[in-house]
Image (cartoon, helix red, strand yellow):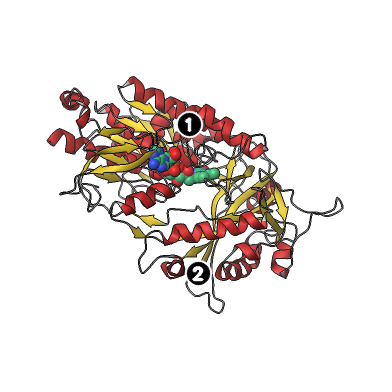
Amino acid sequence: MAPVLRLSELKLPLDHTDADLEAAVIKRLRLRPGQLRGHRLVKRSVDARKKPAVALVYCLDLDLDPAAETFLLGRKKPDPHLRPTPDERYRFVVEPGQAGAASERPLVERPVVIGAGPCGYFAALLLAQMGLRPLLLERGQPVKQRTTDTFGFWKGTLPFNPESNAQFGEGGAGTFSDGKLYSQVSEPRAYVRKVLEELVDAGANPEILTLHRPHIGTFKLATVVRGLRARIEALGGEVRFGARVERLDLDPTTHAVRGVVLADGSSLPSHHVVLAMGHSARDTFAQLHHQGVAMQPKPFAMGVRIEHPQQLIDRARYGEATGHPRLGAAEYKLVHHCQGEGLAGRDVYSFCMCPGGLVVGATSEPGRVVTNGMSQHSRNERNANSGIVVNVTLDDLAPYGSGPGDPLAGVAFQRHWEERAFEAGGGSFQAPAQFVGDFLAGQPSAQPGTETVAVAPSYQPGVHYASLEPCLPAFVLEALKEALPAFEKRIPGFAGKGALLTGVETRTSSPLRIPRNAKTLECTNTPGLYPGGEGAGYAGGILSAAIDGIKLAEQVALAITRS
Ligand SMILES: Cc1cc2nc3c(=O)[nH]c(=O)nc-3n(C[C@H](O)[C@H](O)[C@H](O)COP(=O)(O)OP(=O)(O)OC[C@H]3O[C@@H](n4cnc5c(N)ncnc54)[C@H](O)[C@@H]3O)c2cc1C
């Protein structure tokens, strides 16, 4: 079928058949029998605004009789949600054939990518597809070994490994996550489509192409990243693990990149280096700053993770429709603009919500505790969790820096509070946890008795009931105390006494930005260095990091083929 028209905003009740869907199209467009020859699902979302009538909303590409197509588009008052099907094919900026000659050049022209997260993997994949045989360097381990290391730490059977954990290793920070593929970016759709199609080719469920808010789930993600690696290698690229880049080799006169130096002392020459190191590469941030790579401090957010029974969220969102087979575990998104004294300009919002998931230890450094969340594809764990975080401004960071504008002040801020959480958790990587009732009353929590109705913590490697006050800045405490009751009005039970807070959630986004040229995407003071993804301040999730990786690959390919 060659779809010609796209129809959106087509609403149907939860219980409908395929025949009902076609009938709804025919009715909506007032078609005659036989004029609709077929349809292809583009997107499907849930509209739960008018409970109990929860609806599914479709966007479809329609294969129509040519006469019907002309008639529909030529109508005096065409359907506002009907338009020609857009061309969503991704087009390479450098065709593989064109780059072929470049791929035969010696290693000095071979692009290097630092970091095997979504940004680095997509940069490497695109470079490989354009024939440029990238060399990808990852400090952590392949996903199989990384899974053993990380789950071993969570279960308490292996010691914490600073080079192989929730942040570092194949797939990057999002490997053990819910694998949500949502993004605030309004890029030309070709990028989004390209990422989703590559993920499907690498092993993700094809439903991610058509669900409005798709997610992959953690175990599936492990398969997908292995699939991405295989595709890069099949195209002549190379992926090396346990390969931490210690520093850049920079031309002393021009400050241009000449290559990279690894932690084992070996060096690799390259004039095109993609820097996709993620937001937790604090040692690498410090080294690059020391080498004079341009950097600026950047605001981010911090707070705690909250857990509720998933049932509570489902009831609030879906009402009577809770449990319907066409609805998964419900999500939420909450924002509160603070109004209390001294809190002007503070926003509290939910971050990285994981329906039916687990809270996990996401530190990358010893002596520190960091929370985050992950889910399986099925999202069928008993608790829902999300970060409830408060915006941190540059003024908040100033006391932690070595002077005005210190780009590493945010790292010092994060470390300070992560250390307080480690102490409050008892000093053994357990996270401090406090019930919302106690938090609002300003009293520490104790291990609940069997008679208490309270959320059972899912955090691994375990919680220590305590007070969160010593591990949160005063403005975060005050903002959370104002926001939780406000969120209760949106989701009854959200600020219930037995809801559980675990801390601290500090790795919400990078605490710094590496400025880059808007057109070439090179670092403003380091030619040949292409900083990107979350660590450099250009992405806030898996999808946006992957898209940024594609854009970096495009600029590298253009630079190499022009040189
Ligand atoms: C537990 C958790 C759950 C999350 N859930 C979601 C979610 O559901 N949806 C979503 O969109 N986002 C989620 N995120 C955020 C998402 O994972 C990140 O936004 C995304 O991974 C950023 O991609 P990136 O490629 O820029 O960096 P990263 O994914 O952080 O990758 C950077 C890579 O660089 C490597 N590296 C660092 N320094 C060096 C060096 N010096 N030499 C060599 N290699 C180096 C690291 O080991 C790492 O593998 C989650 C994050 C976590 C931690």
Q: Residue at x 49, y 61 (%)?
A: 413
Farthest residue, direction left: 563
Toward the viewer: 3 or 464?
A: 464
Residue 151's x, y, as percent? 61, 35
Q: Is residue 90 visible?
A: no
Q: Nearer the viewer, mark 2 or mark 1?
A: 1
Question: What residue sits right under mark 2 in the picture?
Answer: 346
Give the quarter the ligand 1 occupies. top left
Give the side of residue 8 with respect to residue 311, left or right: left
Considering only vertical position in the picture, is 295 above or below 75? below
Q: Position of residue 492 (x, y in %)?
A: 69, 60
Residue under pointer 1: 141
Residue in the image at 18% along x and 27% along y:
99
Q: Residue 81 or 204: which is nearer the viewer? A: 204
Q: What percent of the width, then of the height, locates residue 196?
A: 41, 34
Classify 10 Å Cα crowding around label 1: few (below 14), some (14-19), many (20 and above). Answer: many
Whether residue 409 is visible, yes or no, is yes
Dot 2 amino acid type: Arg
User: Which residue is at the far right?
Assistant: 451
Q: Which residue is pictured at 30% across the width and 22% down the height?
A: 236
Provide the secondary structure element on which disc 2 rests. loop
For marks 2 and 1, give the CA distance.
39 Å
